[in-house]
Amino acid sequence: MTTTRDTLIQGALAAYATTDTDTLTVDVLAQTLRMSKSTLYKHFEGLDDLIYATVEYLCEETETELVEVPSSAGAEVVFRAIAAVYGNHAERMPSNLLGSSPKLPKAARLRLDNMQARLGDRMYRAALNLPKATPVTAQAVQSAFAGALRFVRTTPRELRFDELQAVAEAVLHGLA
């Protein structure tokens, strides 16, 4: 089997699930993936490059889901679809990549912040189109989802989607 960038990124994701980013090193990652450090350096300039590539990979998946959200559907359908993208984003992210970890390389942190800002913007616009919504309530919904995204890092990955769906249902119930 040939080792590719994608294989290394998938391995890095598995390593992030058990190793905090501040203790992750090329040595630890190579040992976790059962490969030599030189194999890692063949595909990445260093650990920061691999972390950025992993974050980019995860964000691209979220970007793809955002593009697939139906723009011509009803307001509630669009809102639920954006909430589902939030949930999927939270579920695929290792806990140590969610939140505001200052230990991440700057480029990776900026990419995550940009992705979360895009999610927040889409959530604001989706919430604003809901019946009885005002700019103030749409801003509150955006803030609620951003806060929930930071909070769910302590929730097991398999429950994160459900947690964010519960937030969406509470919003829809509150605006009914």
Image (cartoon, rainbow, N blue to C red):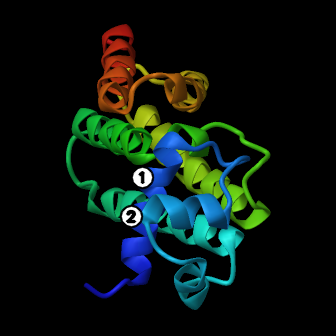
Residue 102 image-quadrant placement: top right
Residue beneath label 1, please? 14
Task: Sort mark 2 into few (<14), some (14-19) or many (20+) by Cα contacts within 10 Å.
Answer: some
User: What type is the residue that disc 1 sits on?
Assistant: Ala
The quadrant in which residue 170 appears is top left
What residue lies at 52% left-to-right and 32% top-to-bottom?
Answer: 149
Residue at 56%, 23% in the rendered image? 151
Mark 1 residue element: helix
Mark 1 and mark 2 in contact (Cβ < 8 Å)?
Answer: yes
Q: Nearer the viewer, residue 77 or 24?
A: 24
Q: How crowded is mark 1: few (under 14 residues within 10 Å), some or many (20 or more)?
A: some
Q: Residue at x 61, y 23 (%)?
A: 136
Give percent across and percent down for residue 67.
Answer: 34, 63
Give residue 120's position: percent from left, percent from top: 55, 42
x, y percentage for residue 93?
46, 46
Residue 37 visible in the snapshot? yes
Q: Nearer the viewer, residue 116 or 159?
A: 159
Instruction: Give the amino acid type for the residue marked by disc 2 in the picture.
Output: Gln
Cα separation between marks 2 and 1: 6 Å
Q: Which of 74 and 33 is in front in this view?
A: 33
- Could you tell me which quadrant the N terminus lies in? bottom left
User: Secondary structure under badge 2?
Assistant: helix
Figure check: 5 above or below 117:
below
Q: Quadrant of the C terminus?
A: top left
Above or below: residue 3 compared with residue 35 = below
Q: Which percent across, then down, holds residue 110?
A: 71, 59
* Res. 10 mark: 2
Determine if residue 55 is in view: no
